[in-house]
Image (cartoon, rainbow, N blue to C red):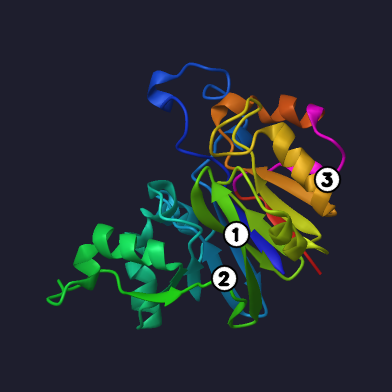
Amino acid sequence: MKITLLGTGTSQGVPVIACNCEVCRSTDSRDKRLRSSVMIEDKGTCVVIDAGPDFRQQMLREKVHNIDAILLTHEHADHIFGLDDIRSFNWVRKAPMDIYCEARVDKNLRIIFDYVFSEEKYPGIPQMNLVPINGDALSIGALDIVPVRVFHHRLPVYGFRVGKFAYLTDFSTIADEELEKLEGVEVLVIDALRKEPHISHLSLGEAIDIVGKIHPRKAYITHISHQMGLHSEVKKELPEGVELGFDGEVLEID
């Protein structure tokens, strides 16, 4: 299985145009982060988790020619506003894109992208086939996927386990019974916004604590704000087996 970190950043924090911090001025490519997303490929199946405003740029950078489906963790703008750009994949596939999401997210997509679901459709609009996630395991091509419920402050969000890989972003709490779904995970990508506590995201220390409960072989931090600090400096503070992820990083699982 091949996992590509499409983006490891966030919309949180001061806009770069108004910020003169060392991270925003860094020339290290690992400090240049697009909105968080990940692509999973195995045995001819390719899925993407979340399609934020940088989706098109991420697809072009990775030279992606086709994807089978998109899984959505939740409906916040930095995770869905790139969905309009699926139209190129519609043309390649000659079919709508399957978008997997829970009922609340489905409802919001139909409001935000009302032109996609209107009775009189404008030519060339993106085509979406909304597929419900209800918490049960599901299969997309060669991938068996287990939704994992977490909470983004009070907002229910889904993380996903795919084989020995798990992706948990945009959350601050997870119940013990959901942690049990992650037993045996070898590679974990997990949210940590910054070192200081945050109301709806894990801090770096909190993320490391959860990594310690799951015991993956490797863990990668995502949804990183500029407040975290320089990649080259933060990595010196991390325990063995935990790294800051960076955009374009490729992970392999047997």
* SS for dot 2: loop
* SS for dot 3: helix
**181 with respect to 133 (left or right):** right
Q: Mark 2 points at which residue?
A: 135
Of the 4 image quadrants, the one containing the N terminus is bottom right
Tell which of 42 and 240 is nearer to you: 240
**254 with respect to 4 (left or right):** right
In the image, residue 169 lies at what x, y percent?
A: 59, 49
- From mark 1 to mark 2, how far is it between C-alphas? 8 Å
User: What amino acid type should be assigned to the residue bearing mark 2?
Assistant: Gly
Residue 235 in magenta stretch: no
Residue 241 in magenta stretch: yes
* SS for dot 1: strand
- Where is residue 179, by image quadrant? bottom right
Magenta stretch, main secondary structure, is loop
Of the 4 image quadrants, the one containing the C terminus is bottom right
Mark 2, residues whose alpha carbon is within 10 Å: few (<14), some, or many (≥20)? few
- From mark 2 to mark 3, how far is it between C-alphas? 25 Å
- From mark 3 to mark 1, how far is it between C-alphas? 19 Å
User: What amino acid type should be assigned to the residue bearing mark 3?
Assistant: Gly
Query: Magenta stretch?
Result: 237-247
- Where is residue 136, by image quadrant? bottom right
User: What amino acid type should be assigned to the residue bearing mark 1?
Assistant: Arg
Contact, mark 1 vs mark 2 (Cβ under 8 Å): yes
Q: Mark 1 points at which residue?
A: 149
Residue 78 visible somewhere in the drawing: yes
Mark 3, residues whose alpha carbon is within 10 Å: few (<14), some, or many (≥20)? few
Q: Mark 3 points at which residue?
A: 212
At x 49%, y 53%, the residue is 58
In the image, residue 192 lies at what x, y percent?
A: 64, 38
How many discs appear? 3
Residue 66 visible somewhere in the drawing: no
